[in-house]
Image: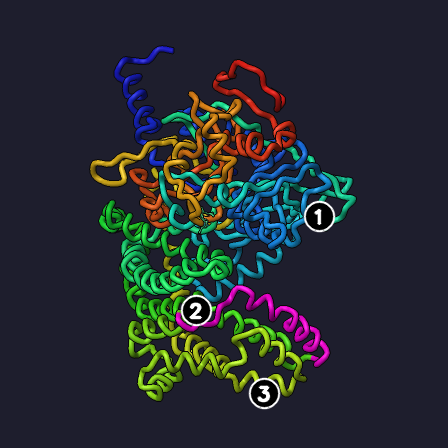
């Protein structure tokens, strides 16, 4: 090849500019279908050794065949030819809990099925794989245009989707779902296959799987052994079937080999899974409202609820058991929102958004063909501002009276019963009523009414004082006047006069015939409280908010389309929407604060540093301490230390939990389970300077299975590899490597 010096130098510069790893932003939750055209070059420049078609291929087994949506909300991956499934401990938690009892507390003690016959069926648990995806935008958007009203557009789209769904080719055991991408500008169809016989194979004790619990949640440096193991079962044709003792382990098209060689700073990593929701293309005002208006309200309310729960949980063992799962749920989002707002502030995220909005506006103003986009940013801003008081009121009511109040669950349950059965036969109602009677105990199993009252009273006061006076619920305000704003007394009366506050009265209620039942229900003060709240939410707030929300959705769709036209040189990934995605990045630390640096890897040594004997978050079992003292790490150690977790710049979000971290060769290197707290703003403003995902080191998982649990027979099923050639000398008892 003959090129002049300047030309080849220019090409080189361009190449460096486009593909230099240091320019790589880390941002992106990419569609597997387009990796070849959009990402492969960059991924290779960052060290990836496999091809895009090794990741996603519908004609032969590829990495995607090992990626499984776990129970709807998490990700998992297949790690053996016999359908062994790896996911997080916090993803398997409910199923581990459902097999736990006081006599056999496997949540506390861990569980390892000694053979397949002892694996535990998990009713309701599903494992979904993607057979293929297809762009169906043309078909779904047929007969729509930019000028039509949004409501009209939606009707047409809904109709088109039904047609497309019928036309997609699929086997009778497969499903089709159609999802909107780029805020409604594109549509993809997914053909999926869902397995329904999933069994629990193994889980470490909580002291490992949940080590550090809420204190360490979202935190780096991290030492949580957040994993659990399941197995997919299929019928004799390897197809989905409900649980049956005759089912056999599923044979996958592909499973992930596991690397024993670990990672070092700068290594290529990729996370493949089902991220839930992001909003990366908001304008400045959109982000501002989240971090400056919405989050503070949510945080303020949860601060108080959590303070009360924590006080009681620390004082009483039974309460701790009852509330730990609820507490974890409330605390998880609460802590994330705090990190999100702080991260945007620290990295000047709003200024960054402003610069982006301004650049967009500049280009739009400069080109007559973009005339139709000229007012989009200001229209969005105006609509957001108009919506704001309504959105904030909604936030107060949902956080203050629904999300953190158990009484609401009871009301919601009865409400469902009524709306489903109003006007239907009494017989149908009777069956449901009996179910309700049986459920009554479960509904209150984890409720302590005196704690609930304390929470309700406290949140009531916050809501009344915080909500815009024009958006207060008249019924509740009447009560407040009647009680002279004595929140405690009102709460006391509400709870003591209601039948919705304990299982006995709820059971008694369900003894009644429909007519008596409905009279009692409708006279109940808790029922009235929530009915009035609902009525106000619907007719006092949502009737206006809904219109604005629709308008904003339409504007965001146009804005997204405009961004893609106005910045043709940029690559755009669609926001996460619980569909299969790839993120990639590099193992990398960062500076969370001036003068401080986070390293990339943690070790078992850190567990011992955090160890607090007897503490419910930081206790360490004798067995693990012994392994640490004798350094009995088998082949899983690195320079005499046991690696535990690492961080990298993969762009992830909720739903990515349980996703595999994959190395340059397509091997499993870690298990994604969290993000660093400083960078939780990545859902609305990814910034490589502080956004990192946290993964459990695959070697730690193997160490726990093999050395801690003595379940080496599971390791024999797996394929362990040495992609970096770091094979260790010495005898290996287990594994096929
Ligand atoms: N922060 C992680 C995620 O968002 C882990 C959550 C586990 N729950 C907890 N409260 N520790 O799902
Ligand atoms: N912990 C999250 C999950 O469960 C992952 C994240 O938000 O980073 O999906």
Q: Which mark is residue 664?
A: none
Find residue 647 and report its image quarter.
top left
Q: Is residue 352 magenta?
A: no
- State whether residue 561 appears in this view: no
For marks 3 and 2, the one nearer the N-term is 2
In the visual, does 220 lie left or right of 52? left
For marks 1 and 2, the one nearer the N-term is 1
Query: Which quadrant of the figure contains the C terminus?
Result: top right
Magenta-colored span? 425-454
Residue at 60 percent across and 39 percent down: it is: 85
Q: Which is more toward the observer, 691 or 109?
A: 109
Q: Which residue is denoted by mark 3 in the rendering?
A: 519
Query: Which quadrant of the figure contains the N terminus?
Result: top left
For marks 1 and 3, the one nearer the N-term is 1
Secondary structure of residue under mark 2: helix
- State whether residue 610 appears in this view: yes
Find residue 513 and report its image quarter.
bottom right
Residue at 66 percent across and 35 percent down: it is: 252
Q: Which residue is denoted by mark 1 in the rendering?
A: 173
In the visual, does 198 lie left or right of 54? right
Find residue 160 and report its image quarter.
bottom right
In contact (CB < 8 Å): disc 1 and disc 2: no
Badge nearest the viewer, 1 or 3: 3
Q: How far apart are labels 3 and 2 at the CA level?
A: 29 Å
Tell me where residue 628 appears, x and y as whole percent: 46, 30
């Amino acid at each position: 090849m003959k090129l002049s010096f300047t030309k080849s130098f220019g090409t080189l510069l361009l190449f460096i500019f486009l593909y230099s790893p240091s320019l790589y932003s880390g941002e992106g939750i990419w569609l597997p279908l387009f990796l070849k055209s959009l990402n492969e070059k960059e991924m290779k420049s960052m060290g990836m050794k496999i091809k895009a078609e090794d990741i996603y291929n519908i004609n032969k087994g590829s990495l995607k065949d090992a990626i499984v949506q776990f129970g709807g909300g998490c990700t998992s991956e297949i790690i053996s030819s016999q359908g062994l499934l790896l996911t997080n401990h916090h993803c398997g938690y409910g199923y581990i809990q459902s097999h736990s009892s006081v006599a056999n507390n496997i949540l506390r003690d861990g569980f390892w099925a000694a053979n397949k016959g002892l694996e535990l069926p998990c009713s309701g648990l599903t494992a979904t794989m993607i057979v293929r995806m297809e762009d169906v935008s043309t078909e779904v958007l047929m007969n729509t245009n930019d000028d039509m009203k949004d409501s009209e557009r939606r009707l047409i789209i809904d109709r088109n989707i039904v047609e497309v769904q019928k036309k997609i080719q699929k086997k009778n055991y497969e499903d089709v779902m159609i999802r909107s991408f780029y805020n409604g500008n594109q549509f993809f169809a997914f053909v999926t296959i869902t397995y329904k016989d999933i069994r629990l194979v193994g889980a470490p004790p909580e002291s490992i799987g949940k080590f550090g619990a809420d204190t360490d949640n979202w935190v780096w440096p991290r030492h949580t052994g957040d994993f659990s193991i399941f197995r997919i079962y299929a019928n004799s044709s390897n197809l989905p079937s409900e649980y049956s003792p005759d089912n056999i382990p599923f044979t996958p098209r592909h499973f992930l080999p596991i690397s024993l060689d670990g990672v070092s700073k700068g290594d290529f990593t990729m996370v493949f899974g089902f991220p839930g929701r992001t909003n990366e293309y908001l304008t400045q005002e959109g982000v501002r409202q989240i971090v400056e208006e919405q989050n503070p309200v949510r945080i303020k309310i949860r601060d108080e609820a959590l303070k009360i729960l924590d006080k009681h949980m620390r004082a009483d063992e039974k309460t701790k058991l009852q509330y730990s799962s609820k507490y974890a749920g409330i605390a998880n989002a609460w802590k994330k929102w705090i990190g999100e707002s702080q991260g945007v502030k620290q990295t000047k995220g709003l200024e960054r958004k402003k610069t982006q909005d301004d650049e967009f506006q500049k280009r739009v103003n400069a080109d007559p063909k973009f005339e139709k986009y000229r007012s989009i940013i200001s229209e969005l801003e105006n609509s957001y501002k108009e919506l704001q008081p309504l959105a904030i009121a909604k936030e107060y009511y949902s956080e203050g009276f629904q999300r953190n109040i158990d009484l609401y669950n009871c009301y919601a349950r009865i409400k469902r019963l009524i709306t489903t059965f109003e006007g239907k036969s009494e017989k149908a109602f009777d069956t449901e009523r009996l179910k309700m009677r049986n459920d009554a105990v479960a509904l209150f199993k984890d409720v302590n009414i005196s704690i609930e009252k304390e929470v309700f009273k406290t949140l009531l006061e916050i809501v009344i004082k915080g909500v815009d006076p024009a958006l207060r619920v008249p019924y509740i305000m009447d009560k407040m006047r009647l009680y002279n704003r004595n929140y405690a007394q009102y709460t006391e009366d509400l709870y003591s006069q209601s039948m919705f506050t304990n299982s006995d009265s709820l059971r008694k209620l369900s003894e009644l015939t429909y007519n008596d039942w409905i009279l009692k229900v409708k006279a109940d003060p808790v029922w009235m409280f929530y009915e009035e709240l609902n009525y106000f939410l619907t007719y006092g707030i949502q009737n206006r908010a809904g219109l604005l929300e629709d308008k904003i959705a339409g504007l965001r769709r146009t804005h997204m389309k405009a961004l893609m036209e106005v910045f043709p040189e940029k690559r755009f990934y669609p926001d996460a929407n619980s569909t299969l995605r790839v993120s990639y990045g590099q193992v990398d630390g960062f500076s969370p604060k001036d003068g401080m640096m986070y390293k990339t890897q943690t070790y078992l040594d850190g567990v011992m540093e955090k160890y607090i004997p007897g503490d419910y978050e930081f206790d360490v079992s004798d067995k693990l301490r012994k392994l640490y003292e004798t350094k009995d790490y088998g082949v899983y150690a690195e320079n005499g230390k046991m690696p535990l977790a690492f961080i990298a710049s993969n762009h992830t979000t909720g739903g990515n939990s349980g996703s595999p971290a994959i190395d340059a060769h397509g091997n499993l290197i870690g298990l994604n389970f969290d993000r660093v707290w400083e960078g939780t703003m990545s859902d609305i403003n990814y910034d490589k300077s502080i956004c990192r995902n946290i993964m459990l080191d695959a070697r730690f998982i193997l160490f726990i299975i093999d050395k801690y649990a003595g379940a080496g027979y599971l390791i024999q099923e797996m394929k362990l590899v040495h992609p970096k050639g770091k094979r260790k000398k010495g005898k290996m008892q287990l594994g096929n490597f």
